[in-house]
Amino acid sequence: MNKKIVIIALALVFALSTATAGFAAKLKCTVDSVEGETVTMTCAKADKLKVGDKIKVSPPKKKGAVEGC
């Protein structure tokens, strides 16, 4: 009985954590200019953003060569 409760609780925690991660908005943007610490970008679906919103920007991943045997 106790194992079933623990399993159900863990399943609920997992389901809720993955559901909240899915709500984060992802926008595709292009950098137009960089001047000092100011970056100007053009984004698709930019109407979802508001003035003062804090966003996380990550640079594109560099694709390196894959070495074989």
Image (spheres, helix red, strand yellow):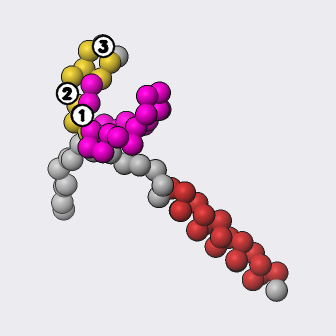
Q: Nearest the camera: 61 or 50?
A: 50
Q: Secondary structure at mark 1?
A: strand
Residue 52 among magenta residues: yes
Give the mark toward the camera: 1 or 2.
1
Residue 62: name its quadrant.
top left
Of the numbered discs 1 and 2, the one sitting upstream in the chain is: 2
In the rendered structure, which amino acid carries the disc numbered 3? Gly
Q: Number of callouts in the render? A: 3
**Mark 3 and mark 1: span between their CA atoms?**
18 Å
Left or right of 52: which side holds 27? left
The tag on residue 32 is: 2
Mark 3 vs mark 2, CA separation in Å = 13 Å
Specify whether residue 44 is painted magenta. Answer: yes
**The residue under label 1 is which amino acid type?**
Thr
Q: Kindly identify the residue that appears in the image at 65 percent across and 70 percent down.
A: 12
| Amino acid type for the residue under numbered disc 2 | Asp
> Where in the figure is residue 24, as x and y percent of width and height?
46, 50
Residue 42, labelled with which disc?
1
Q: Residue at x 75, y 83 (%)?
A: 4
User: Residue 31 location, x and y as percent?
Assistant: 23, 31
Task: For mark 2, give the secondary structure.
Answer: strand
Q: Earlier in the sequence, mark 3 or mark 1?
A: 3
Where is 7 relative to 39, above or below?
Answer: below
In the image, residue 22 sits, relative to residue 33, either above or below, namely below
Q: Nearer the viewer, mark 3 or mark 1?
A: 1
The residue stretch that appears in magenta? 40-61
Q: Give coordinates of residue 54: x percent, y percent.
A: 47, 32
Distance Cα–Cα, label 1 vs label 2: 7 Å
The residue wearing badge 3 is: 36
Do the residues under discs 3 and 1 have CB atoms within 8 angstroms? no
